[in-house]
Image (spheres, rainbow, N blue to C red):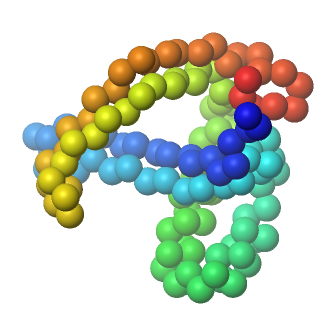
Amino acid sequence: TGGPGLVFVERKTHEDSWTGDVSVKERFAINESQVMEFLSGHFDLDEEEKKLVAKGQSEDQISDWKSLVYSTIQAINSKQLVPTLRTQCMRTAFQIPFDATVRISLDTNLCMINDREPGKGRWYR
């Protein structure tokens, strides 16, 4: 099959429970065709912001999105991050319908794939 159509960029911040802070998972989606621009720091925030406005997103949602995208780009650039590892697994989740207070996820057939040199102009193998 072809490459992925939509790519989720996710930032997880884990906090120790004794601090009273909660762990946070933040994510946003970009098109696969935009990943190389994103990784190289040439992602057009203003153009994407216009698309969110056209979709009817609130100012608060757009502000949160922009802050997350900008801080992610800044971290990638300042730390010179590049894709190095991809994981693939089969996930099975169990939870009571319409109640996410308890959820159990089992990941099986876990594969870790070296993506250090995916090929010219690609971010994945």
Q: Position of residue 107 (x, y in %)?
A: 34, 26
- Given the current orientation, which residue lies at the most extreme right position? 120
Q: Is residue 86 left or right of residue 3?
A: left
Residue at figure coordinates x 60%, y 56% from the top left: 29
Residue at figure coordinates x 77%, y 21% from the top left: 118
Q: Position of residue 115 (x, y in %)?
A: 67, 19
Residue 18, picture quadrant: top left
Q: Is residue 50 above or below residue 120?
A: below
Q: Position of residue 38 (x, y in %)?
A: 74, 47
- Given the current orientation, which residue lies at the most extreme front position? 1
Closest to the observer: 31 or 41? 31
Q: Is residue 79 left or right of residue 43?
A: left
Residue at figure coordinates x 27%, y 47% from the top left: 23
Closest to the observer: 14 or 7? 7
Closest to the observer: 91 or 69? 91
**Quadrant assignment for the C terminus:** top right
